[in-house]
């Protein structure tokens, strides 16, 4: 379906180019064969867990990699009321190594990959698909059972099942909605993990107060870049009539429909209003050169192509929205969703503004917002965070509303990677923060050498960078999806 489908697929971007690679320390030599005494029977041990079944094993040098299904209660408060199959993956190195528990908060990739903390500690990795993302969805789906506590309880139950096999230290991690998920897991089950590494995790404490985003967009990048982006976005609304004809032809060609959002017009404006946000979420300041410099005199095709490249005109179709119904449901019931102003666009050009999550979920699914959910988590983090590390990107809009630490926090940190976007990581931090963050992760995982314990500057990832294994599959949903 041409380039628009790229927005529904994982776009592989290498964020390890910031020299995350480091030689293994003498105290923790890197294992390279994955042939420990437990490796030969690891599958038998996994499948001995009640409710665990094998979907597929895939080879990868130095590891064993399994795609598995695990039987979970639909409702952890009432386990007898039905079950569903939740997909997880296991990247097994050695039961003598620490384990990283990863979720992106959406689907789980079935291609072997290693998250940054896994590389840092040279450990095993358990990855979980978030409940209600297919195929990990009950049938029939009781959407009232999709909430942050139920999802945290999924993780807790997986951890309890696997801990007897992987009995060393555990670190939970995730990026974006996955960073939020790691935080919620820690809030509800604070005794499970030995540390948390949450990347670019939004924290929308008060859903209808979003001025932090307006302040962010007023100062991000350079004025020249902001002006270019703003002008293209405005011009797309000025040319709504001819470009919507292009959109209608595009939708007809691809058999796209607009029942959920309500109309092609609503989908068109939503896509255009995502444009500036989407650029800063996924692009760098250097990419401003790709934006039309003179929007007023640009052709319709140039305006269409720029909006489509960054926002993706396929997304607000029924076919684009359907895979992400679980996210929009959560955004409209617990997580919250941002709203921003457009002071450089005449109000007469904007008909709908940032539409609420309710507009992106089929009407037969009931939704009711719970304003206390995020306030509870925010208060808990401020007062109880322990062994928690947050990493944000300076130019990522989602970092405008972030987690912050209070006086009750212990051995916890919030760092910002200069110039980076929604792919920010520990490797992108300034040198002293990078060293400290790496040292704390090693310490929490129980694999910090004496040298690192006495001097964080000595901290480096224990596993060498693997150009294939350490690629990051970034779920690049067109803007406004964390």
Image: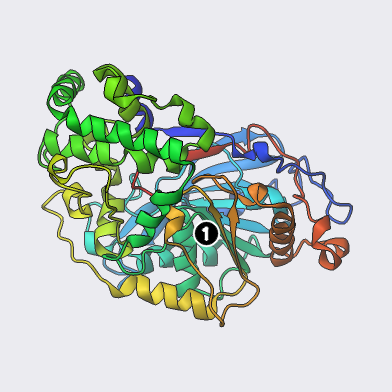
Mark 1 crowd level (few <14, some 14–19, many ≥20, 10 Å Cα): few
Instruction: Report the colour scheme.
Output: rainbow
Residue 365 versus residue 153: which sits nearer the camera?
A: 365
Q: Is residue 302 visible?
A: yes
| Residue 439 horizontal side relative to residue 364, left or right | right
Residue matched to label 1? 49
Q: Residue at x 14, y 24 (%)?
A: 248
Q: Position of residue 13 (x, y in %)?
A: 54, 34
Q: Image height check: is 246 above or below 221? A: above
Q: Residue at x 82, y 66 (%)?
A: 453
Q: Position of residue 112 (x, y in %)?
A: 57, 38
Q: Residue at x 38, y 40 (%)?
A: 278
Quadrant location of the N terminus in the rendered image: top left
Q: Residue at x 24, y 51 (%)?
A: 139
Which element is circle 1 on?
A: loop
Q: Position of residue 235 (x, y in %)?
A: 24, 30
Residue 33 versus residue 182: which sits nearer the camera?
A: 182
Q: Position of residue 55 (x, y in %)?
A: 46, 41
Residue 327 versus residue 297: which sits nearer the camera?
A: 297
Q: Residue 443: which quarter of the image?
A: bottom right
Residue 371 versus residue 88: which sits nearer the camera?
A: 371
Q: Image height check: is 411 above or below 151? A: below
Q: Residue 238: which quarter of the image?
A: top left
How many numbered dots are placed on residues in this image? Answer: 1
Q: Residue 154: which quarter of the image?
A: bottom left
Q: Is residue 477 visible?
A: no
């Amino acid at each position: 379906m041409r380039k628009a489908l790229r927005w529904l697929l994982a776009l592989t971007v290498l964020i390890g180019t910031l020299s995350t690679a480091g030689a293994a320390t003498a105290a923790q030599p890197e294992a390279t064969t994955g042939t420990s005494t437990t490796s030969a029977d690891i599958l038998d041990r996994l499948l001995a867990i009640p409710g665990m079944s094998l979907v597929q094993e895939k080879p990868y040098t130095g590891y064993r990699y399994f795609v598995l299904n695990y039987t979970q209660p639909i409702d952890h408060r009432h386990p007898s009321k039905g079950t569903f199959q939740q997909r997880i993956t296991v990247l097994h190195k050695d039961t003598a190594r620490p384990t990283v528990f990863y979720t992106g908060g959406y689907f789980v990739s079935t291609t072997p990959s290693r998250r940054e903390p896994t590389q840092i500690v040279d450990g095993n990795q358990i990855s979980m698909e978030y409940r209600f993302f297919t195929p990990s969805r009950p049938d029939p789906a009781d959407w009232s059972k999709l909430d942050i506590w139920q999802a945290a309880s999924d993780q807790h139950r997986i951890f309890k099942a696997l801990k007897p096999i992987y009995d060393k230290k555990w670190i939970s991690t995730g990026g974006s909605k996955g960073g939020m998920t790691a935080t919620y897991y820690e809030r509800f089950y604070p005794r499970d993990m030995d540390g948390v590494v949450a990347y670019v995790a939004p924290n929308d404490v008060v859903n209808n107060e979003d001025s932090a985003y307006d302040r962010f967009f007023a100062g991000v990048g350079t004025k020249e870049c902001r002006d270019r982006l703003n002008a293209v976005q405005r011009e797309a609304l000025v040319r709504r009539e001819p470009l919507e004809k292009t959109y209608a032809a595009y939708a007809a060609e691809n058999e796209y429909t607009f029942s959920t959002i309500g109309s092609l017009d609503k989908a068109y404006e939503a896509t255009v209003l995502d444009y500036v946000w989407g650029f800063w979420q996924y692009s760098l300041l250097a990419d401003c050169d790709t934006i039309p410099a003179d929007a007023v005199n640009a052709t319709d095709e140039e305006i269409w192509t720029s909006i489509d490249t960054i926002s993706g005109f396929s997304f607000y179709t029924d076919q684009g929205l359907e895979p992400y119904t679980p996210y929009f449901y959560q955004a409209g019931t617990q997580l919250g969703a941002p709203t921003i102003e457009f002071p450089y666009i005449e109000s007469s050009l904007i008909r709908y503004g940032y539409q609420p999550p309710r507009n992106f979920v089929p009407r037969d699914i009931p939704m009711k917002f719970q304003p206390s959910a995020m306030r509870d988590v925010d208060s808990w983090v401020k007062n109880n965070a322990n062994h928690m590390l947050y990493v944000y990107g300076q130019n990522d809009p989602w970092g405008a509303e972030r987690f912050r630490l209070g006086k009750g926090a212990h051995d916890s940190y919030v760092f910002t990677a200069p110039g980076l976007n929604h792919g920010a990581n520990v490797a992108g931090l300034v040198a002293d923060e990078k060293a400290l963050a790496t040292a704390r992760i090693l310490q929490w995982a129980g694999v910090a050498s004496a040298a690192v314990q006495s001097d964080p500057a000595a901290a480096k990832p224990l596993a060498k960078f693997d150009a294939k294994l350490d690629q990051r599959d970034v779920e690049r949903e067109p803007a406004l999806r964390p």
